[in-house]
Image (cartoon, rainbow, N blue to C red):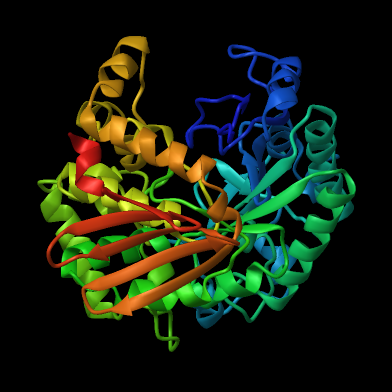
Amino acid sequence: MHLLPFYNPIDGSDAGFDPIDHSEVDSRIGTWDDIKALGKDHDLMADLIVNHVSAQSFQFQDVLAKGKASEFWDLFLTKEDVFPNGMSEAEQQAIYRPRPGSCFTPMKCGDGQTYDFWTTFTDNQIDINVKVEAGIAYLNNVLTKFSANNVNIIRLDAAGYAIKQAGTNCFMLDETFGYLDNLSKQANDLGMETIAEIHSHYQTQVDVAKRVNMVYDFALPPLILHSLFNNNADALLKWLKISPRNCLTVLDTHDGIGIIDAGPMGEKPGLLNAEQIDNLVETMHANSNNQSRQATGAAASNVDLYQVNCTYYNALGANDFDYLLSRAIQFFAPGVPQVYYGGLFACENDMELLAKTNVGRDINRPYLNAAKIEQALNKPVVKGLIELIKMRNEHPAFAGEFSAQGGASVCCLMWKLEQQSISLRIDFASRTALITQLNGTQESTLNLQSLLA
């Protein structure tokens, strides 16, 4: 069970990813005792927001009031910390930022001085100096809280941006890998596992997987879409043969649908080329009747360079079979599948919420109540998805060896453990998908289409 940020407050400018107090549960939803109770019966995952803290935090408010005289001055990163001798235009242009514009926000403090604070994401998310004692102590405090309250998996949010160094792009540096090593070891020593949340080139995911307990397979969602849009499984098969096995697979999350994870980056070729990425994005926009275009890029205040804001269901044109097929591929891919609540109920784009907030990601962050959930549970596509979830959780072969074969429009994904096996054979061109189970000499076959009956 992954609980999205439950810290004080849950309704900040970035839905809890900008904590005012990372060590405190928002009192409107509960206490640490409630978190502890949930963790007794479930593996519980929580976010460690590594890179930043809210500008509304008492620490940063003290800095604004006192400037360098604040006891919390060292906690926050400024341009001067990384570029003490000044920064050239070329150095600024080299910095990788997930959103357009500068990563620095000038703010005037109570000592009369204006300082350029590092704000990788928004001006309400002030970057932490993770190299100094104050930054280390801040994150240690949160880790200790997690450990004491039955959180046993830590999602390292935005960890790829944590280390900044002059003359680099300040993203996923060699030093960052070392930092992830140490952070993961620290969590392990407290009895917790770590999972890295990093959108980057696919080879980076392979490299990061060696440093932490698990990584997200963010390349999978766009590759499944590409296969369905083009009736071709070649790129998907290439990835499944080299993807990390210690991964968490997703199609949708509380963020948008990542794109750069499958594409080229700089001189590095991607699993998809630039033209294929463009086609992928435009097809998603078309399938959603251009709703996703209204929530993506400069069209909404939550501007991101690497994702399309849309439900996965609408990215597939609300086609029940294609959606169920995409989930079947996810469940047969290596790793532990995670299903986002909006995806579980095959939710469509929430245009009303988007219009209300003008925050792009809100298109895929629906507010649900018991009546809406009950209605969704009666939809054939949701019933079919639940059957697939049961199969993935219960079939013993998924604990065995994985293999992937095929080419062009056909692919076969198989799991085998001793005398038992389960396979998914897909022909994208004819839109047929068969799940075959073998137990010794007994064989049974399920047509995926029948789950929608």
* Number of marks present in the image shown: 0
Q: Which residue does the image show at 51% across and 51% down from the upper left?
A: 121
Q: Quadrant of residue 109?
A: top right
Furthest toward the bottom, the residue is 267
Q: Relative to 395, is 181 on the left or the right?
A: right
- Residue 292 in view in this figure: no
Q: Quadrant of the C terminus?
A: top left
Q: Nearer the viewer, residue 190 or 306?
A: 190
- Please state the horizontal and vertical placement of residue 135, each as a whole percent of the image: 80, 49
Residue 151 position (above or below residue 337): above
Q: Nearer the viewer, residue 418 or 120?
A: 418
Q: Which residue does the image show at 21% across and 62% down from the upper left?
A: 228
- Please state the horizontal and vertical placement of residue 35, each as a whole percent of the image: 70, 22
Q: Quadrant of the N terminus?
A: top right
Residue 352 position (above or below residue 137): above
Q: Which residue does the image show at 30% across and 48% down from the upper left?
A: 309
Residue 351 position (above or below residue 272): above
- Residue 29 in view in this figure: yes
Furthest toward the front, the residue is 441
Q: Nearer the viewer, residue 384 or 244?
A: 384
Q: Relative to 138, is 359 on the left or the right?
A: left
- Please state the horizontal and vertical placement of residue 5, each as a whole percent of the image: 59, 32
- Please state the horizontal and vertical placement of residue 69, each as a whole percent of the image: 83, 42
